[in-house]
Image (tube, rainbow, N blue to C red):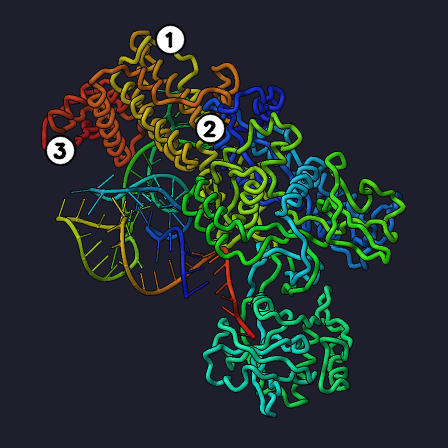
Amino acid sequence: MPDRPTLEGLEEKWAAAWERDGVYAFDRAAPRERVYSIDTPPPTVSGSLHVGHVFSYTHTDAVARYQRMCGREVFYPMGWDDNGLPTERRVQNHFGVRCDPSIAYDPSFEPTTASGGGGAPEPSAKEPVSISRPNFVELCLRLTESDEQAFEDLWRTLGLSVDWSMTYTTIGPLAQRVSQRSFLGLLERGAAYQLEAPTLWDVDFQTAVAQAELEDRERPGAMHRVRFGAADGGEALIETTRPELIPACVALLAHPDDERHKGLVGGEAVTPLFGTSVPVLSHPLVEQDKGTGLVMVCTFGDLTDVTWWRELSLPVRSVLAPDGRLAEVAWGTPGWESADLDKARESYAELSGRSINQARRRIVELLTESGDLIGEPEPVNRAVKFYEKGDRPVEIVTSRQWFIKTIEHQEELIAAGRRLEWHPSYMRARFEDWVNGLNGDWCISRQRFFGVPFPVWYPLDEQCNVIHSQPIAATEQQLPVDPSTDVPEGYSAEQRGQPGGFAGDPDVMDTWATSSLTPQIAGQAGEDPELFAKVFPMDVRPQAHDIIRTWLFTTVLRSELDQGELPWRNAAISGWVLDPDRKKMSKSKGNVVTPMHLLEEHGADAVRYWAASGRPGTDTAFEAQQMKVGRKLAVKLLNASKFALADLPAQGDELSHPLDRAMVARLSRVVAESSESFEGYDYARALQRAEELFWWYCDYYLELVKGRRYDSSPEVAASVSRALRISMSVFQRLFAPFLPFVCEEVWSWWQQGSIHRAPWPGAAELDAELGGGGEIEREELALEIAAAALAEVRKAKSQAQLPMRAPVTRVIVTDTAERIGALKLGADDLRQAGSIELLETAEGEEFSVEVQLAEEAAA
RNA sequence: GGGCGCGUAGCUCAGUGGGAGAGCGCUCGCUUCACACGCGAGAGGUCGCAGGUUCGAAACCCGCCGCGCCCACCA
């Protein structure tokens, strides 16, 4: 035991020891009922970590450590989510490249702007270099490798008790096999299908996106009142924020009850500038009090257009190209009729090739010139849907995509959500809201490059047309497969792209389509059946509340589809870290706090203490002050342990002193509360209860028993010696899930083995120390009153500005007969702790203490 | 528009039917033999507002106000 214990160096010392001794290694020989498995969130490896990661992963680690100490064999893997758009975008910026799948692989390619990875992205002013898909994927892997090392270093410094031998990545061969195998199973059972249909589309990334990846952003727009021609030579006025879609108009709609437009419904209207006849129909979703009550349906301006298009069986008249520009249109061909083809061509030529915004500005000019714009456009602020990682609003583009059926499973998903135990329980509402609000099946294909490919090919007919209806599935032996380079069974490589040959599916799966299988990936479903049976269904999914609709929802869906059961029993939902102004931390706001320097400045235990103080599900403001408090607690644990354990006299066989027994009784209750809190995933409460008692223990109990602890006679010290061993052992273990480094340190001073494999303290063992004696209530009363009297003595000294060791001539404690009787059980300790020469008691109505200081007596 | 959560000391928050609390910050004091990375003491609150239930409400119920998050078919 060191003379002056310190926190410095404990992280390095114990992290190395834990690794060396395999303290956190998962023992797969353990029986199923003893296994506690965690579906760890694989953090998105984007090169930057922030303090929010530390926050929620600490919560999980505290629970993992608690369960491990309870005797469970904890399956706690780490995963890296490196697959997907964030990595692609980072690689593009970092290396100044762009992926072009039509280019052939160049084995000698070396990026020019590479800085070795890890650091901040270096925006390149130069035009990006186009490289092949394999070269691009290589760069993605190179960059994520260094990112993953940085993450692992951070987690080790933070003291996460993961088993690092179980680490997976979402782009690795294991994840690809599991993901592709699951997809093929869905395909075989008809739960996955492909369809050419209107799809949410990001025009910058040029890929489909899912409903779950949308977010609303307020954007200024303008409402334009536009005149359509009516059949009787009259006019029909509509209002729109998207006049550039007038050439894509396929109908006008009114509400069935709307008297104003009764004359129009059933007839036709003519688009301005383009002269295209469109039907005027009615539909109950039209809101009469919006605009003129007459609405233009385009293919496609928003999701409502899709609904109307589908329900009213309207034709498609699509003007938007995948790159977000207005496509060329062959006026005069079917679907592009006009009463005045020259005018339509002339008008459209002004728009063709322009971006949406450019086209909008231009068509407003054209409508103004033609007199079809009524009045001035009226500025409006409106919520526009964006892909959450995108910079321009999502559009709806018709394309062929893969879907997983979800709508037909809504009811069983709700039921599954109700079988799951949510912590905190109210988080389930978010899940149900989301499932109830689903408006389509889950689109999982992305027109991107760094992802898990769809493991299918298609036959080509003699004209090289792709026969999408007859996908050729990869075989189990081929997995993981890349259909852009691998060849389906029964074909040769030369037949790729040839008449009568084959073509690979060009798309990759959305990153959620793979990360929705983290329990199966971590548990190695289909790869290691014995392991999978040991860990699945998992005990807990820890995650933040913002991805309930994505990660949690999709994981439940996949598990229901593949295993027919819940992926886990519990969902432990954590909040966010907000900046001190209670705003969400985000890179764009520039308020992100990175964690490494915090760990260096305050120490891992202190940072963990702050994190563990954040209640489950609750957003917590970042506060360095709390870390200082955590550091104080860790230091206190060092010093109290030293006091309690250094050169401790021999302990007796039993706790005989009333105050010792009373302290242990209190401790027993806190152990019970702390355990109960942990069982309900309320780590914060478990910490708070232990901490509260610990400070009281240091301030009162340790001071009260100091005299006996240093007493030279073994009989006097025997009980307190035993009490100190018991209590320090319990406190050290109660704090071990939160402050693993300092607890391991103080444990090592006097115990064998790691504290993190020591048994969690039980109230029963403490109650056994007390025996069944009926005196315990009275003994607790003695401790309570002795502590209160000591506080009064301190108060007197403090107000007289005297040191705490100043002698007190006389103290009179007044209280009821019963309480005075109890106090006598602890009178000796009180006298000693307060440096009281004469301690008297008196019976009275209520508790009061009269203190006569030596100085006062002298004066 | 709907759902969920929150509103308690300057700050961060605990407290779910009976005494308004903790830590930090602030003020004052103390080299105390575990700890100056310390110890002791003190000031500081209309528990968002208004009703109701109850012997008794910070807590339970109703309404309102404010903040946050999520969702929705705002043309």
- Secondary structure under tag 1 reads loop
- Secondary structure under tag 3 reads loop
* Horizontal arrangement in the rendering, residue A747 relative to residue A126 (left or right): left
Count every numbered label the image shows and give the total: 3
Within-10-Å neighbours for mark 3: few <14, some 14–19, many 20+: few
The picture places residue A857, in percent across and down from the top left corner, at 18, 27
* Horizontal arrangement in the rendering, residue A351 relative to residue A303 (left or right): right
* Horizontal arrangement in the rendering, residue A804 relative to residue A756 (left or right): left
Q: Mark 1 vs mark 2: give the one in front.
A: 2
Residue A672, can we see it?
Answer: yes
The picture places residue A717, in percent across and down from the top left corner, at 32, 11
Question: Please, is residue A314 above or below residue A178 in the view?
Answer: below
| Residue behind mark 2 | A66
The picture places residue A404, in percent across and down from the top left corner, at 61, 50
Q: Earlier in the sequence, mark 2 or mark 3?
A: 2
Given residues A764 and A11, the one toward you in this image is: A764
Quadrant of the drawing holding the C terminus of chain A: top left
Within-10-Å neighbours for mark 2: few <14, some 14–19, many 20+: many
Type of amino acid under label 3: Glu
Asked whether disc 2 touches disc 3, contact meaning CB atoms under 8 Å apart, the reply is: no
Given residues A848 and A341, the one toward you in this image is: A341
| Picture quadrant of residue A329 | bottom right
Type of amino acid under label 2: Tyr
Type of amino acid under label 1: Ala
* Horizontal arrangement in the rendering, residue A643 relative to residue A83 (left or right): left
Q: Chain of mark 3?
A: A
The picture places residue A296, in percent across and down from the top left corner, at 59, 77
| Residue behind mark 1 | A650
Q: CA distance from mark 3 to mark 1?
A: 40 Å
| Residue behind mark 3 | A846
